Structures are given as structure tokens and as C-alpha cells.
């Protein structure tokens, strides 16, 4: 038998909390706090639920959000630095119940510094407990932002709860239009996997390149929003294993409109440096 799901949205100033099959009441009292003691209480996050808020931070004005989980869940926190007046970054950190930064098994903190007009994401699989998200801008003053946090029951999440893509670090490139591109550098190894999320509005030719500056092989692939490796019309998978001190390209000649991810990982390496570039070389028509 199929159960009926309902969606309800609560509004408070510039905050909303969306939940399936019910909602949590009484979670929107007061302003966003500047410490864990006065943090905005989101309540219990469960699979399929999300919360978003638009606000500003800067200097001594920090924003803290408190949430709990009653079981092991994958949490995705996304921050958009929406300030169009200044070039200062906004930092987002995931904290434990004591207010200390959480770290992965490799020692890297669950932290992202989001530059002006960019979006940063933290994904983590958390045990049942109480946690906080801290937003701050040490150099900025009244830096505008859009914040969203969501939960899913499996995987580390990709920000929309539609699948279980297993990234340690994810960068949201946003809409990649014809003629646009970008370059990045990073480091991967073991469970530390990097993902680059992007979308295209029209069928396009996407050209990407990865240079391995580490000592061990780095795997590099293009996947769709269901986690499946993309294939060309000839059946070739867009996947490459890049050896140390080498570079390889992946070219998707006729990629359909949608959301995609480039995944960078090294199962054999521990801390492999790389450089990555991607470009939409233009819209194409299928004849």
C-alpha cells in the first residue's frame, strides 16, 4: 500500500523549513544567534527534510544553527555567498555538540571558505546526536548569504537528496553556459573524493582535463545525477585513469541538458595533488 506524503512549509522572516509527512513546531523563535548557546534551533533533521535561511554575517556578527539527528544520516549543508557589494569570503563550519569543528578520518575539518558570488558545500555522514553549523566572515561586514541544510538516509548526499554520491568535498559550479569554463586544484586519496557539480541548459560540448601532480594514479569520470557514468553515442564511458605526471581529457561531444558531476578520486593514493579544468565549448545541434 502506498502512503500519502504531504509537504508543509513554515516561514519566519527569511527562513523556511520543508518536511515530508509533518513538521516540527516551535523551531523559529528569535534571531539567529552569535554562539552555540543562542543558536537558531532547526530541530531534528530527518531524511527528506530541509531548512533554508537568507541572512548576513560579518566581523563579530556570526550565525549559528543547531540541529539534531536521531539516527545515522547523510547531511548536506550548502552556502551561497550572495553579497554583490564586497569580495569577502564567508566560512561555513560543521561543529559537534561542544562547538568544536568536526574532522574526517583523514584529519580534514568539515569546513569550506566560500568566495564572493560562489557556492560551497559540506557533505558528511553523521551519527545520531546534536550538531551546529557556524557561518562567519572575518573580513566582511553584513555579507549576504543563502544557507540550506538537508538530510538523506544513504550516502553522503549531493545537495538535492536525489541519490547517494559519495563525495568528501563537493564544489557547485552552477550553470555552465556556452563559452564558460573554470580551473581548480585539489588533493584526493582513499575515502577523500572530490566532486564538481554543474548543470547545462542546452545540449553542449563539454571539455575537461585533469593533470595528476601526485605520485599515484587518479581516476577521473563524468557522471549524471543518478550516479551513472556518462557514455558517448558510440558507447564509450567518459572515464580515465591518469598516471602520475600525466594529463588526460574527457570530451562529451553532445551532452544533454541536465545536472552532472566530475568525480576525482585515488583508491591507491593517500594525498594526490591534481589540477582540473572544465569548459563548455558551445551548444550543439543533433542532426
Image (spheres, rainbow, N blue to C red):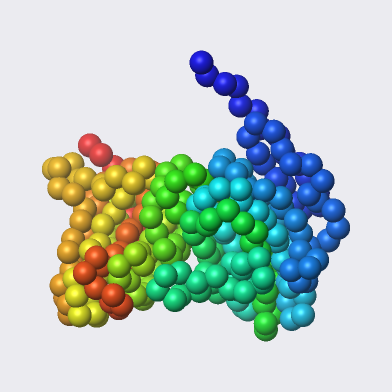
Name which residue lies at 42% across and 50% down.
155
Residue depicted at 24% across the width and 65% down the height:
267
User: Is residue 167 in view?
Assistant: yes
The residue lying toward the viewer, choosing from 40 and 233, is 40
Please identify the residue farthest to the top as the structure is shown: 1
Tell me: 15 left or right of 239: right
Q: Which residue lies furthest to the bottom in this view?
A: 139
Q: Is residue 139 above or below residue 202?
A: below
Q: Is residue 221 above or below residue 118?
A: above
Q: Is residue 235 above or below residue 57?
A: above
Count of numbered tags: 0
- Horizontally, residue 189 falls left or right of residue 88, namely left
Q: Where is residue 251 in the image (x, y as percent from the top left)?
A: 22, 57
Where in the figure is residue 94, as x and y percent of width and height? 59, 67
Residue displayed at 61% across by 48% down: 70
Q: Please give the name of the residue rendered at 74% of the width and 68% of the height, measured from the top-left corner.
A: 36
194 displayed left or right of 43: left
User: In the figure, residue 56 lies in which quadrant?
Assistant: bottom right
- When the figure is inspected, residue 217 is found, relative to residue 223, above or below; the finding is below
Task: Please name whichever residue, 34 or 37, is drawn nearer the observer in this view of the structure.
Answer: 37
Can you say which quadrant of the picture contains the C terminus? Answer: top left
Image coordinates of residue 256 in percent, x first then y, are 33, 43
Relative image position of residue 72 (x, y in whole percent): 52, 50
**Would you say residue 275 is visible in this rendering?**
no
Amino acid at each position: 500500500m502506498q502512503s500519502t506524503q504531504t509537504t508543509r512549509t513554515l516561514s519566519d522572516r527569511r527562513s523556511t523549513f520543508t518536511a515530508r509527512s509533518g513538521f516540527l513546531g516551535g523551531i523559529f523563535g528569535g534571531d539567529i544567534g552569535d554562539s552555540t548557546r543562542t543558536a537558531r534551533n532547526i530541530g531534528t533533521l530527518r531524511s527528506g527534510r530541509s531548512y533554508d535561511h537568507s541572512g548576513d554575517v560579518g566581523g563579530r556578527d556570526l550565525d549559528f544553527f543547531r540541529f539534531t539527528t536521531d539516527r545515522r544520516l547523510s547531511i548536506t549543508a550548502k552556502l551561497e555567498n550572495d553579497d554583490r557589494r564586497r569580495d569577502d569570503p564567508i566560512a561555513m563550519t560543521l561543529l559537534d555538540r561542544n562547538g568544536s569543528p568536526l574532522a574526517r578520518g583523514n584529519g580534514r575539518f568539515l569546513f569550506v571558505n566560500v568566495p564572493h558570488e560562489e557556492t560551497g558545500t559540506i557533505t558528511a555522514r553523521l551519527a545520531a546526536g546534536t550538531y551546529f553549523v557556524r557561518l562567519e566572515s572575518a573580513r566582511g561586514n553584513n555579507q549576504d548569504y543563502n544557507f540550506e541544510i538537508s538530510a538523506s538516509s544513504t550516502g553522503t548526499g549531493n545537495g538535492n537528496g536525489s541519490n547517494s554520491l559519495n563525495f568528501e568535498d563537493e564544489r557547485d559550479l552552477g550553470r555552465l553556459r556556452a563559452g564558460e569554463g573554470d580551473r581548480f586544484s585539489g588533493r584526493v586519496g582513499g575515502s577523500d573524493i572530490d566532486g564538481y557539480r554543474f548543470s547545462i541548459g542546452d545540449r553542449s560540448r563539454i571539455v575537461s582535463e585533469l593533470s595528476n601532480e601526485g605520485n599515484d594514479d587518479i581516476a577521473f569520470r563524468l557522471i549524471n545525477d543518478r550516479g551513472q557514468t556518462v557514455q558517448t553515442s558510440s558507447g564509450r564511458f567518459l572515464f580515465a585513469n591518469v598516471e602520475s605526471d600525466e594529463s588526460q581529457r574527457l570530451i562529451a561531444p553532445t551532452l544533454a541538458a541536465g545536472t552532472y558531476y566530475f568525480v576525482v578520486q585515488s583508491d591507491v593514493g593517500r594525498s594526490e595533488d591534481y589540477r582540473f579544468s572544465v569548459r563548455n565549448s558551445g551548444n550543439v545541434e543533433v542532426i
